[in-house]
Image: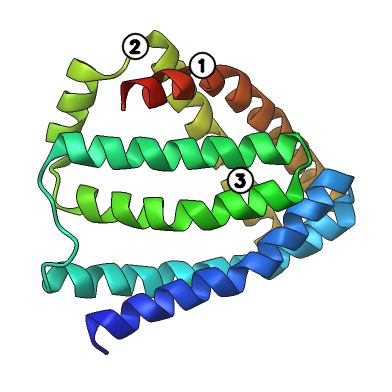
Amino acid sequence: MNSISTIETCISDIEGDIPAIQQLISDISSGNVMNIISDVTTLIPLVEQAVSDCEGALIASYGKGLLRSADPATCYTDASNSAYDVYNIVEAVIAKNTTGAILDAINAVSDVTGAIGSCDGVNVADLAEYIYANVLNLAQQICVGDLISSLVDVDSLITDIKSGATVEQILNDVTNIVTALNTDYDACEPVIAQIIGEL
């Protein structure tokens, strides 16, 4: 399969996931816990397939030289744009703006793809050095830490669903995620505003 067709497959997977994401956002907004569990269960194989196909697209494109940059500054800027997209999605979910969250998620696709491309050729140590030397202050470090913590909570939910955990444990995971998202919002709102002001 050539790089163009693998990219098209990746995009098709992401577009195909949107209805399921829309349903999940709707159920989160309405607080329907049992439907949330069902939605996440439905999403897991879809997301896993999309990740697999998009990794293939990235590898193919990298081999063709289509997605490569060794500039830490460009990588950081593109990643910041993606972070802003995530912030908008979280803000829309908290505001129970289902349509806004879906539109923000769609907009995030191109920015995340760009970030993957521009960061692909960047040495991790060089990027870390650039960020610490030019970007991060204490508030930003707190925001990043909170976001990482949220990813751990999401991973715990997925693991528990796959392992057949009790409803009580899954409800606890969902509660942890909601709490973490609220913490992320409080910690990252001023940080994102600052980043956007610097772009």
Q: Above or below — where is 6 with respect to 191?
A: below
Seen at 44% across and 12% down, the residue is 139
- Identify the image quadrant of residue 169: top right
Q: Residue 130: image x %, image y %?
A: 17, 26
Q: Which residue is mark 2?
A: 137
Query: What residue is shown at x 69% (from left), y 66% (from top)?
Result: 20
Please name the colour scheme applied to the rendered image: rainbow
State the quadrant of the N terminus.
bottom left
Helix, strand or loop status at disc 1: helix
Q: Which mark is nearer the camera, 3 or 1?
A: 1
As drawn, is 55 to the left or to the right of 129? right
Comparing 173 with 64, the one in front is 64
Q: Nearer the viewer, mark 2 or mark 3?
A: 2
Amino acid type, label 2: Asn
Rounded to the nearest angstrom, the CA distance separating label 3 from label 1 is 24 Å
Q: Residues within 10 Å of mark 2 (few under 14, many from 20)?
A: few
Give residue 112's position: percent from left, percent from top. 39, 52
Residue 173 pos. (x, y %): 73, 41
Q: Earlier in the sequence, mark 1 or mark 2?
A: 2
Task: Tell me: residue 50, above or below residue 138.
Answer: below
Q: Secondary structure at mark 2?
A: loop
Left or right: 175, with 120 as reference point? right
170 lies above or below 189: below
Confirm whether residue 168 shows in the render: no
The disc at residue 190 is: 1
Q: Identify residue for label 3.
A: 154
Residue in front for this viewpoint, 96 or 180: 96
Considering only order in the chain, which callout, 1 or 3, is on the residue closer to the N terminus?
A: 3
* Foreground: disc 1 or disc 2: 1
